[in-house]
């Protein structure tokens, strides 16, 4: 169990909090979605209420180690001020004169936001001198940025070499729910994997084969499995180099008694476009010139039946090209089935999180992870540097 903000005395202390304020902005610097800011509020409000001096930091975009106003966090300070009902002071730099001056004279309960940590190239290289400079601004470190916890950067992990380090509420929730599912899942435990690339999911498949009752494979990655079973997949996505791997997974699943479900039918298209001609056919007999862009009705039903009876569900990756309305049915049906399941339901970040949110199912899920890459690595069983550096109870 991780130590959290509640396990350390923060009153009157300077607390450096690594948040994920990497919010989307339009060309005029307006925040277009502030979910990440809202997500950070519980930890910040708790620290303010406890009388801590709260120093926030985050990255934003990819400024490549140089100061660039386009990637300034100033709009975030303004939005935070609105939410907190108090002024969040914006530093003009990260560890320079402005940051030092603003953090030197803080009152209890005051909040300061440092500039984008990626204005320093040292941040992503995790250079100890830079980590130390960040640490020198504060007395306690709180990591609450799950989305970057799989990266060993100065502000996500390096700084913990110099300060007592604990988890914020967001990270705690991610680890409790996902870790709980992996360690003591209620059964049946079903993992749903989709998306374009087999390569991205290898680690997850390998780890989950030892934990789940069923692995459902959909999306573009499924066709490599169909090919491995001797099917003809037309022009569907194929990862030639991983056909043998797909065969190994199928053999391993059999050996371990895991029910590995591969699509039996699909919706094929005569081109990669929403308006393409489409037809339902067996996933093992897709004609040349056609490509599978969604799971078919028989597969959808089979997947949904298993999902609805699950007690734990983890989902990462869409079942088809859901960005095309005409090929989104499978992904929508799977989202519905997950929403209906009387189960702990966990949506990995990225595309599946976006799909579930856009379809209006977000509040029906137990947990939607705030980190795409980080949640994948967590499901692979890899220890995340931004979590490993935190104190344990
Ligand atoms: P990933 O980034 O690996 O999670 O993949 C997500 C992407 O996979 C989405 O943009 C989907 O459009 C794409 N995708 C899903 N199914 C297919 C498919 N059958 N053929 C091509 N692309 C697909």
Image: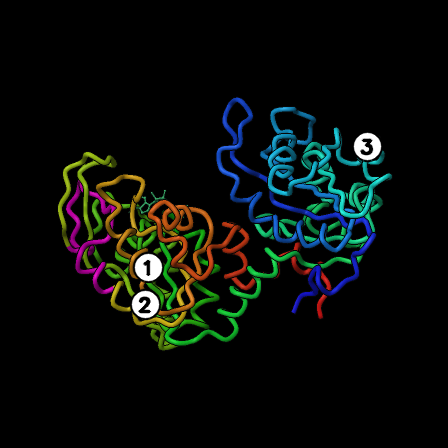
**Mark 2 sits on what residue?**
260
Q: Is residue 162 visible?
A: no
Q: In this orientation, which residue lies closer to the viewer: 287 or 279? A: 279
The image quadrant that residue 118 belongs to is top right
Q: Are marks 1 and 2 in contact (CB under 8 Å)?
A: yes
First along the sequence among labels 3 and 1: 3
Boundaries of the magenta span = 282-302
**Mark 1 sits on what residue?**
217
| Magenta region includes residue 38 | no
From the viewer's perspective, is residue 72 above or below residue 111? Answer: above
First along the sequence among labels 1 and 2: 1
Q: Quadrant of ligand 1?
A: top left
The image quadrant that residue 309 belongs to is bottom left
**Mark 3 sits on what residue?**
96
- Helix, strand or loop status at disc 1: strand
Among all residues in the image, which is located at the extreme front?
Answer: 85
Disc 2: residue Cβ within 8 A of ligand 1's nearest atom:
no
Question: Which quadrant: the C terminus?
Answer: bottom right
Question: Which quadrant: the N terminus?
Answer: bottom right
Q: Are marks 3 and 1 in contact (CB under 8 Å)?
A: no
First along the sequence among labels 3 and 2: 3
The image quadrant that residue 98 belongs to is top right
| Magenta region includes residue 294 | yes
- Helix, strand or loop status at disc 3: loop
């Amino acid at each position: 169990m991780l130590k959290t903000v509640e396990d350390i005395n923060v009153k009157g202390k300077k607390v450096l909090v690594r948040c994920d304020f990497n919010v989307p902005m339009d060309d005029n610097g307006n925040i277009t979605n502030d979910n990440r800011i809202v997500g950070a509020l519980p930890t910040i409000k708790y620290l303010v209420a406890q009388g801590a001096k709260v120093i926030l930091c985050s990255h934003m975009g990819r400024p490549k180690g140089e100061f660039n106003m386009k990637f300034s966090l100033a709009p975030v300070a303004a939005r935070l001020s609105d939410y907190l009902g108090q002024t969040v002071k914006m530093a003009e730099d990260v560890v320079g004169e402005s940051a030092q001056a603003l953090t030197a004279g803080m009152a209890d309960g005051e909040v300061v936001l440092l500039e984008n940590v990626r204005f320093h190239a040292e941040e992503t290289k995790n250079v100890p001198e830079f980590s130390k400079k960040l640490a020198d601004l504060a007395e306690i470190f709180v990591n609450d940025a799950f989305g970057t916890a799989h990266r060993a950067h100065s502000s996500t992990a390096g700084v913990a070499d110099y300060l007592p380090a604990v988890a914020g509420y967001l990270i705690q929730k991610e680890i409790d729910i996902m870790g709980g599912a992996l360690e003591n899942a209620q059964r049946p435990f079903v993992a749903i994997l989709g998306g374009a690339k087999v390569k991205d999911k290898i680690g997850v498949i390998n780890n989950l084969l030892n934990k789940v009752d069923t692995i459902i494979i959909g999306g573009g990655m499924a066709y490599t499995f169909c090919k491995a079973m001797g099917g003809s997949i037309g022009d569907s996505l194929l990862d030639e180099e991983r056909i043998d791997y797909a065969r190994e997974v199928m053999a391993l699943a059999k050996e371990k008694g895991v029910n590995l479900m591969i699509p039996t039918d699909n919706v094929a298209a005569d081109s990669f476009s929403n308006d393409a001609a489409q037809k339902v056919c067996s996933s093992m007999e897709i004609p040349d010139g056609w490509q599978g862009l969604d799971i078919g009705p028989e597969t959808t039903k089979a997947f949904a039946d298993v999902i609805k009876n699950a007690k734990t569900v983890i989902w990462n990756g869409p079942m088809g090209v859901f960005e095309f309305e005409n090929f989104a049915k499978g992904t929508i049906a799977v989202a519905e089935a997950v929403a209906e399941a009387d189960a702990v339901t966990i949506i990995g970040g990225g595309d599946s999180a976006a799909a579930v949110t856009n379809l209006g199912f977000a509040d029906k899920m137990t947990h939607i992870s705030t980190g795409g890459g980080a949640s994948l690595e967590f499901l692979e069983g890899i220890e995340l540097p931004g979590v490993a550096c935190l104190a344990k109870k």
